[in-house]
Image (cartoon, grey):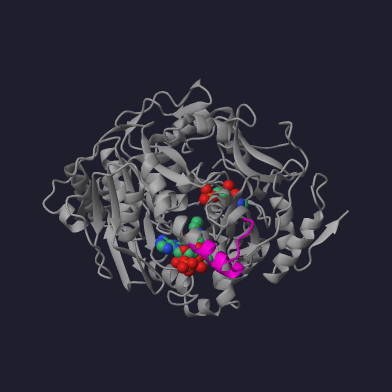
Amino acid sequence: MADYQSLYQLSLENPHQFWQEASQAIDWYEKPTKILDDSRPPFYRWFADGVLNTCYNALDRHVQQGRADQAALIYDSPVTNTVKTFSYRELLAMVADFAGALVAQGVQKGDRVIVYMPMVPEAVIAMLACARIGAIHSVVFGGFAARELATRINDACPKLIVSASCGLEGQRVIPYKPLLDDAIAQATHQPEKCIILQRPQLTADLIAGRDITWQEAVQGVTPAECVPVAATDPLYILYTSGTTGIPKGVVRDNGGHAVAMMWSMRYVYNMQPGEVYWAASDVGWVVGHSYIVYAPLLYGCTTILYEGKPVGTPDPGAFWRVIAQHQVNVLFTAPTAFRAIKKEDPQGSFLEKYNLPSFRTLFLAGERCDPDTLFWAQNLLKVPVIDHWWQTETGWAIAANCLGIEAKPVKAGSPTTPVPGFNVQCLDENGEEIKDDRIGSIMIKLPMPPGCLMTLWNNDERFVSSYLSAYEGYYLTGDAGYKDSENYLFIMSRIDDIINVAGHRLSTGGMEEVLASHPDVAECAVIGVADQLKGEIPLGMVVLKAGVQRSDAEIVKELVQMVRDKIGPVASFKVATVVKRLPKTRSGKILRGTMKKIAEGQTYRMPATIDDPTILDEIETSLEKLGYAAKATASS
Ligand code: COA
Ligand code: AMP
């Protein structure tokens, strides 16, 4: 086996050879002869003349090649008291049936299908069914509100939406159908049909002529065969927060994605086909797309679909129970899940009830892994704990300790070194590479490896302006950090207004748009403040219009409810305060960074361009009343 350095070198110097070899792990109807099409930079295409079907590679070939009776998917749902195993044969049959149902409803190759579902097997089945017929799925996370769903409906223009009557959040039943109906009412684009999974916990009302139940949809249908698609045809669109309230529709191809997923299972996660992989995330996020659904199945593993939380379903031993019961080899989750467990069970005593002989490695991503969480998990689990860094746009890890190549020493706070294929550089404001450990903008030199976003849905222009315009020939990750002398990366913060709440990526700009729409609000700012459990939480500050007489508390309550209604509970927007003025530069730019430092009790430098420094004292006083800004001091 080659060492990391030589594989990394090869991937950058001879990407054609590197990815041509990797592409052999996929079954193609027509093998690609063109590995990288670089004729139209900055748009690069992988395996451009290859023809394949992603669902065929994830299911059919395993059934044909000896895995028919192996567990493909284990649905473990403590919230419904269910554990159900689907073999590859069973999953294929259900996917082919549902694909047939989609065809019967008029869905064809290239049509979009929105999937707005909780963590139930039917969500995975719907995604794979779309892949089977060449339709493009767009999964929307259940924690988003109707308005967010409406925005995605208008952008993706789906022919059909697949949803469910409800989701289950701990003990609570969350009705999904009223949100769906509300979203469709708000949207200008109208889907022709909705297929609704009726769950036993709640029956949804259906709209005649538009809605049919999942159960009706699959009745008597002809199972659909796989439709060959070009490697460059889109497999899915996944919306992610941008710097405005309008999300970005990340477009993933079929060919590059399949190759990258397969490669990562072996070389990043050190998995063997037949083993059990568990990504404790949600199908609505990229982690769910890549590592609940596609990668484990493409690679012939068993994947776990967990409808529960790390704590409270029923206790902080839930993760250990799942690992023990299903003999999980690798767990992938976000550090926040471990902080939640640590908070409820600091000694890790729930682990004593379980034996985890199968458990080999814990992978963490979604937010920076703080050293405390790393050490706690290492000490408790006595297995390697691997932080790795990636984003919705890349679809897989940009930097990781690639255990399938060579295990490198772990450095707390670092996701280790760039993954082969990713030429990661840390650039200063002039676009020069920083060679020491000063913080800079983390960029990826083009072309990026297979599996990364092809463009933004229907918006090449925004793709170029958002990601490819900072420095020619580079992709802007939006993260800031540094590399040490051994090429280890340290990802420290964002350069934009994105915040990371419990591993969920959110735009403070989007929240500001909501606050600004309140009739009593003149201006506002939302900042991300450090939080022990969720990493960061949003905090809003609003200035009221002159003459408003209502109580601050009443207005704050309405603001919290508005963000919940318009963005969703996932934003965790619970803290806001009314202030007299917001600190600004002389050119009128709100000093959000300074307010963040004050809220977090850090020492902050008085901005040279500040218009009126006394406003910072007022802000400090307001934040102190909320329990923030304990030790904030201005340095000269
Ligand atoms: N459908 C509807 N509502 C949802 C939802 C869904 N799929 N997922 C979350 N929500 C709601 C929650 O009920 C909560 O609502 P509330 O304000 O009424 O309580 C809100 O959205 C925030 O949810 P969450 O961020 O999950 O916070 P939490 O306090 O319920 O749980 C953790 C905190 C740490 C336990 C939880 O975030 C977690 O398990 N994280 C694991 C990491 C993860 O999944 N990361 C994703 C990327 S890898
Ligand atoms: P998402 O697109 O939701 O996966 O969020 C991606 C963003 O989360 C990245 O751009 C980072 O800001 C942050 N992130 C994800 N993983 C890590 C990590 N391991 N270390 C630091 N930041 C991370």
User: What are the residue bounds of the magenta stretch?
Assistant: 545-561
Viewer-proximal residue among 557 and 592: 557
Is residue 586 shown left or right of residue 265?
Answer: right
Is residue 632 part of the magenta span, yes or no?
Answer: no
Residue 598 appears anywhere in the view: yes
Decide: is 357 above or below 508: below
In which image quadrant can residue 104 be found?
top left
Q: Residue at x 51, y 33 (%)?
A: 463
Q: Specify the farthest residue to the left.
A: 220
Q: Residue furthest front?
A: 547
> Is 543 on the left-hand or right-hand side of 206?
right
**388 or 636, which lies in front?**
636
Does 558 appear in magenta?
yes
Q: Position of residue 286 (x, y in %)?
A: 46, 49
**How many numbered discs, if any?**
0
- Horizontal and vertical percent for residue 14? 55, 27
Q: Nearer the viewer, residue 558 or 605?
A: 558
**Does residue 387 appear in this view?**
no
Where residue 624 appears, as percent x and y from the top left, is 72, 69
43 over 598 or under it: above or below: above
User: Can you give x and y, in whole percent of width and height, for residue 9 in the image?
Assistant: 61, 34
Residue located farthest toward the top when viewing the structure as drawn = 39
Quarter of the figure that contains the N terminus? top right
Residue drawn 43% across the image and 38% down it:
251
